[in-house]
Image: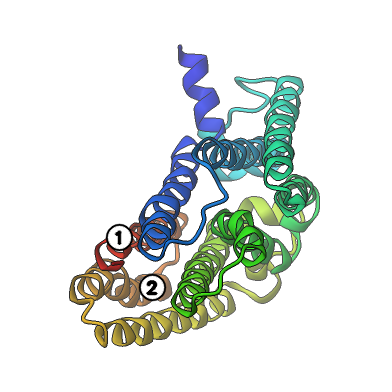
Amino acid sequence: MQLLGHFFRLLRWPNLVFIAITQILFHYFIVLPAANSHAFPLHLQQHLFWLIVAASVLIAGAGYIINDYFDINIDQVNKPDRMVVDRIITRRMAIFWHLVFSGIGVLLSVYVGYKLHNPLIAIGNILCVVLLWVYSTTYKRKMIIGNVLISLLTAWVILIMLVAELPGWWNSIITAADTQASVARLTRIGVLYAAFAFIISLIREVVKDMEDIEGDRRAQCKTLPIVYGVNASKVFAGTWLAILVVMLIVMQTYVLIFQWWYASLYLLVTVTIPLILLFKHLFKATTTIQFAQVSSWLKWIMLAGICSMVFFMLYTR
C-alpha cells in the first residue's frame, strides 16, 4: 500500500485530477449547454469523451515519470526527501510504466481519432508524448523554450477538446446564422481558456525555475534564473502576470455588458485580486520555500480560473 502511495506521488496525482477536471468542466459546462441550446451536433460521444480524458491523464502521468527519471541528479539537491525514482521505484520500472502509460494513451487517441475521422487527435497526443520526452532530456535544461513547451502542453489539455469537435462542426451542414455564431463563440471561449492556462503556466514554470535554481545549476542547466539572474526572472514573470491581469480585467468588463454579474464577481475575487496580490509576494520572495509558496498559489488560482467554466451553463440559454 505504501508503494502505491509513492507511485501516485510520482504521477503527481493532484495534477492529473486537475487535467481531468478541466476537460470535464469544459465538456459538460460549456460545450454541452451550447450544443443543446443552439441545436448543433456533438460529434464527441460520451464514451469517446471519456477516452480522451483517460488519454490526457495517462500521457501526462507518463510525462511526470520520465521527467523524474531524467531529473535524479537535480532532485537529489532540490527535493531529496521526495524522490521516488531510484529510491523507491527502480529506474527500469519507471521506464516500463512510462512506456505503458504513453502507449495506452496513444492507442486511445488513435481509436478516438479513427472513430471521429479526425487524425489531429492522435497526431496531437503523439506529439505530446514526444515533446515530453524531449523536454525531460533536453529542453528542461534550456532557457525559456522548456517553459514555453510545458505551457503549450497545458493549453493543449483544453484545445484538444476543440480539435475533437471543430472539424465535425464545420463539415456539418450548419446554415443557421445563430448556430454558426454559437460555434464561433464556443471556439473563442476555448481559445481564451487555453490562453489563460498558457500564461499562468508560463509564469509558474519560471517561478519553479527560481525555486529549483541550486539543483539546476549543479546539473549545468541554462534556465532563465541561472543565465540572467533571479531579479530578471522576476521581471519576466511579473510582466506576464501584468498581462494576464489586464486581460482578465478587460474580459470581466466585457461580460458585464451581458450582465454576467456572478461570473465577473467570482473571477474578481478568486483570480484577479489574488494575482494582483501575488505581485508583492513574487518580488519579495528570496528563499526556496517562498518561491514554492508562490508556485502553489499560482496553481490554486489557475484551478479557480478553470472552475469559472461552471458559470457558462448558467448563462447559456
Return the residue nearer the eye: 213 or 134.
134
Q: Quadrant of the N terminus?
A: top left
Q: Quadrant of residue 17?
A: top left
Q: Quadrant of residue 36?
A: bottom left
Q: Position of residue 313 (x, y in %)?
A: 30, 60
At a point 19% along the width and 71% down the height, the residue shown is 262
At a point 74% along the width and 64% down the height, the residue shown is 222
Amino acid under disc 1: Met
Where 220 falls versus 280 (above or below)? above
Q: Which residue is mark 2?
A: 284
Q: Which residue is mark 1?
A: 313
SS for callout 2: helix
SS for callout 1: helix
Return the residue nearer the eye: 287 or 1.
1
Q: Quadrant of residue 148?
A: bottom right
Can residue 296 be spotted in the picture? no
At a point 57% along the width and 60% down the height, the residue shown is 162
